[in-house]
Image (tube, rainbow, N blue to C red):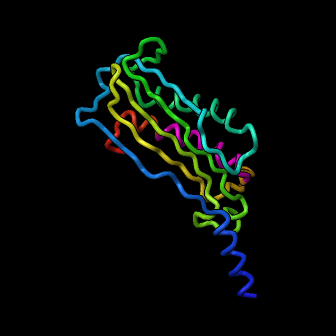
Amino acid sequence: MKTIILITITCLTMAGCASTLPQKSVVQGNYSVTDAKTFSTALSCDATKVDGVKDGFVKDYCQILAGNIKIALQKELRGIEYNETNPDLAIQVNLEEVNGGSAAARLWVGMGAGRSITTVYVKVIKKGVTIAEKRLTETTTTPNLITNNYANDDAILQDAPLVARKVGEFVKNPARE
């Protein structure tokens, strides 16, 4: 019986593990957004690597994530107004990866098995010059059974505000992220 349990856990762990993209971060030494008066944000989802979620999920998720990013930036960049036409600061976000992971592994194994993964690449452009860029990753490792949040799509959706907050914090202070 112990052997069967061990084999089952091993299979769930191996089937539910997904790797993340390598970290990358470049920040100019004189990084500052304090003199910016306006900002804009753009989210690209055209080349997103998708696995473990329903067909068409990323299109809707992209809209949700874009709204969350705009709100997170408005929160972090208080005093800087949103302006799509000719902003001092342009934040470009590319949704690189959405991997739903394995709901079964998250539920039965835990400890990171079956984690969902959302990866974005952020560029901060000030007056036409890239002053910072970084790959940010958010993962969900445990299901939220209280809210019936255990499906892969649900795990990715719950990560949208967390990804957005990381984007906002990075833009405000990239040394902290």
Residue nearer the viewer, 96 or 13? 96
Residue 155 drawn in magenta: yes
79 left or right, relative to 16: left
Does residue 37 lie above or below 60 as drawn? above
Does residue 153 lie above or below 164 as drawn? below
Does residue 13 lie above or below 39 as drawn? below
Counting from the top left corner in percent of width and height, residue 49 is at: 61, 44
Residue 107 drawn in magenta: no
Residue 106 position by quadrant:
bottom right
Residue nearer the viewer, 49 or 41? 49
- Outermost top residue: 85
Q: Residue at x 76, y 88 (%)?
A: 1
Magenta-tinted stretch: 151-166
- Outermost front residue: 47
Q: Residue at x 33, y 41 (%)?
A: 26
Counting from the top left corner in percent of width and height, residue 167 is at: 46, 37
Counting from the top left corner in percent of width and height, residue 73 is at: 46, 29
